[in-house]
Every structure is written in structure tokens, then in C-alpha cells.
Amino acid sequence: MLIYNRLFFVLLFLSATITSVGAAEKPSPTSSAITPAQKYTRTSQEKQKITSPLPAFLLKMHSYLATQDYHTIAAQMFHRAVQDYERWLKQGQPEDFHNALFHINSSIEITPDASEYLFFQGMLYASLKASPASLTQATDSFLSVLELQPDHRQARFALAQVLQEQGKFRLAAEQYQLLLEAYPEMVTGLVLAPLGFCYLAGDYLEFGLDYLKNLSHKHPKSAPLRTTLAILLQNNNRNSEADKELKQIQHEKLGTKSEQEYARLLQTRWQMGGKP
């Protein structure tokens, strides 16, 4: 079945890429009186003109396939998908988005084990945040990428975001945690902020506090980690512990100046009775 799917999409690609030859000729002037034999001959010639480009097209197709493999054609379709997507981002035309999906889906049909094609497919579906069906498709795409390439961190981060968009906060938190454990350089606000949100929205604050406390032992100088921990403590009515975390960021000058300033602003806000 796979070989037939590949051939189908190759033919579609070629029909859009290779222009047919043998354009119809202009009809010659005719006399006013046409015999039945002449009429029959003309009809045959016209039929021949209609069908004559077909062999030329097949010859071009054969010549093209002789110099290209499936992976090359799939790569060309992927390139078109990227162009369509960029055009859609600039102009917002639905046709461009549908073309992008068609081309990337064609690439995947031809080479189903190409993780980058699956990742791009997931990014396309994930861009339609208002569509539950599209978010489900994006989830499936990112899971397929991770099955092929478990260390694909962009796919894991995108999967966490898509799960969060769907309100699956515990599943999203698990993906964020896997990123933090596998890649210490990702212990940043980019991952910790949505992780903290998932703990709060998913209503398992105690688990989140335990996890972040243990993580802080591994990364004691991470300002985003201590800030996220402080926010969870404040939401758990453990105000003095939250204040201690923010003070440590400022006193030890952890992180960047903007991260230290944010800790100071949070501390001031909470002291004035503001919500976390």
C-alpha cells in the first residue's frame, strides 16, 4: 500500500511541476463547403491533437523519476510547504495554509519516518489553536516525532504546549519535567513559567512544590526556578517561605538584573496585599 501512496503523491507533484507539451495548434481557415469525409478527417486530427501531449508527459515523468528518488521529491514538497506557510503568515490566505498542509502531508506519505516533516506538520496544526481537532492532530504529530527521535527537545516542548492548550495540565507538566531533567540548560523561565501554571491550573500544587524544591537542590542559583517556587508557595499561603525565596534572589544577585528586579517587584506587591 505504501508504494501506491508514494506513486500517487509523486504523480500529483509531477502534474503540478511538469508542464505538458504540444499546445493545440490554431485551426486553419476552411471553405464554406465541408464534405462528410473532410469533417470526419478533421475530427480525427482534433482528437489526435488532444491526446498527443500524453505520451510526451509520460516521457517527461519517466525522465524525471530516473534522476530523482522519493526522498528528493519529499524534500521538494517540504520546501513548498514551508513557502506556503510563510506566505500564510504574511497574508493570512486560507488557501496558502491548506497548500502547506497538502505538501507536508504528501512529504510524510512518501517518507513517513522523517521526523522533521512530522514536526512541521505538528507546528502547522498547532497554529490553529481555536480548533480542538487540529490540536489533537498536532499532539499525534509530536508524539510520532518523539517515537522516532526521543531526544527531539523542540517536539517535546511543543507537545507540552499543545497539551496545555487542551487543558491537559498534568500531561503537559510531565513533558515540561522531562525537558528539565534531560536538559539542564532549559531550567529557564520559558519552561518553568508554564510548568508552574500547569501545577496551579491542574490543582496539584503540593506535588509541584515537592518537585520544584528537589529541582532547586540541583540548580540552587537559578533565579527563574526560585521565582516559580515562590509563586507556588504564595498560592499555598506559605508567605514567609515565598518571601525568603525572593530575598535570596536579590541578596545573592542570582540570574539577570531583570530577573532580580522582577523578584523585587513581586515581593513589594505581596507585601502590599497583592495577589500572586
Image (cartoon, grey):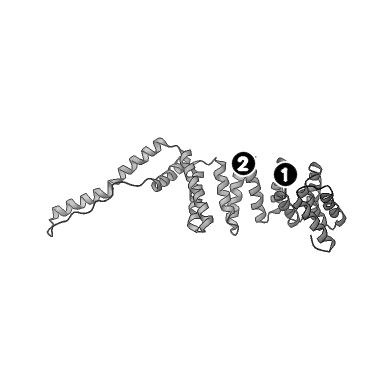
Q: Which mark is residue 180?
A: 1
Residue at the spot x=58%, y=46% of the render?
Answer: 119
Instruction: Judge by depth and name the residue closer to the eye, 265 or 74.
Output: 265
Look at label 1 and name its amino acid: Leu
Look at label 2 and name its amino acid: Glu
- Residue 237 image offset from top left, x and y in percent: 84, 58
Q: Which mark is residue 271?
A: none
Q: Residues within 10 Å of mark 1 (few under 14, many from 20)?
A: some
The secondary structure type at the circle numbered 2 is helix
Q: Is residue 134 left or right of residue 183?
A: left
Instruction: Judge by depth and name the residue closer to the eye, 276 or 60.
Output: 276
Q: Which residue is mark 2?
A: 147
Give the alpha-carbon distance from disc 1 to disc 2, as whole Å: 19 Å
- Residue 179 image offset from top left, x and y in percent: 70, 44
Q: Is residue 268 visible to the viewer in this orientation of the structure? A: yes
Residue at the spot x=52%, y=56% of the render?
Answer: 90
The secondary structure type at the circle numbered 1 is helix
Instruction: Judge by depth and name the residue closer to the eye, 216 or 3.
Output: 216
Residue at the spot x=19%, y=52% of the render?
Answer: 42
Q: Is residue 1 visible to the viewer in this orientation of the structure? A: no
- Residue 88 image offset from top left, x and y in percent: 51, 55
Residue at the spot x=59%, y=44% of the render?
Answer: 144
- Residue 236 image offset from top left, x and y in percent: 82, 57
- Classify the position of the C terminus by image quarter: bottom right
151, above or below 250, in the image: above
